[in-house]
Amino acid sequence: MTTSARTGFLVLAMLLAAGAHAATARDARGHKADAAPKATQQDWGIAGSPRAATRTIEVRMTDTMRFTPSSIQVKEGETIRFVVANRGRQKHEMVIGTRKVLDAHAALMRRFPTMEHDDDDGVEVHAGGRKNLVWTFNRPGEFAFACLIPGHYEAGMIGTIKVVPTRKP
């Protein structure tokens, strides 16, 4: 097997290990190269419709490699509009997932640091910018959000999301 074939196989294996994380490629101008994928159910929920959002939570990111708030609680079934504000001088991102998926994705980012994201469960935000991320938490549990830019995750740029189950009569 050639070196390029082994590298391609390794990249494919890591993407599959990351829970079939749906990423859309971008061309050199930053435009989507393919049509946006259909929202995919993940262990931590599914992309939400902005019209379905029942609450807005501002999440601030800084160059101290921290999120504010760093801990969020939502109810099962709740659709949240996150307003993700980068108060730092460097690019940051907020990606939602399980710790296992975020760990695998962070490892992939270390190998390919210029990879850009256009995912339903995450946003990249340039210095001073803001973006919205809408997510429906339709499964209870404890999940995480993180900045996966190389060095940021390792510096502790991670938060937690607790999805409290809805009691059914």
Image (tube, rainbow, N blue to C red):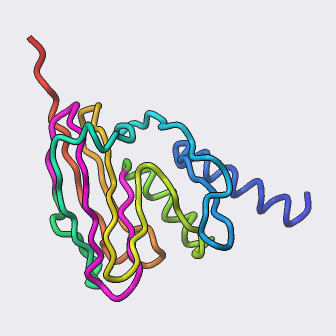
Q: Where is 131 relative to 140, above or below? A: below
**In this orientation, which residue lies closer to the viewer: 34 or 13?**
34
Q: Where is 2 relative to 62, above or below? A: above
Q: Is residue 77 left or right of residue 100?
A: left
Rendered residue at 22%/50% (across/down): 161
Rendered residue at 30%/53% (across/down): 144
Which residue is the extreme one toward the top?
A: 169
**In this orientation, which residue lies closer to the viewer: 11 or 127?**
127
Quarter residue 129 falls in: bottom left
Instruction: Find out whether residue 28 is within the magenta segment.
Output: no
Rendered residue at 69%/57% (across/down): 11
Give the x, y percent position of residue 155. 34, 77
Give the x, y percent position of residue 62. 26, 80
Q: Quadrant of the C terminus?
A: top left
Instruction: Find out whether residue 82 is within the magenta segment.
Output: yes
Magenta segment's dominant SS is strand
Quarter residue 64 falls in: bottom left
- Specify the segment rendered in magenta: 72-96
Rendered residue at 39%/85% (across/down): 90
Give the x, y percent position of residue 110. 55, 72
Give the x, y percent position of residue 127. 36, 82
Q: Is residue 79 left or right of residue 114?
A: left
Q: Quadrant of the N terminus?
A: bottom right
Q: Where is 78 relative to 30, above or below? A: above
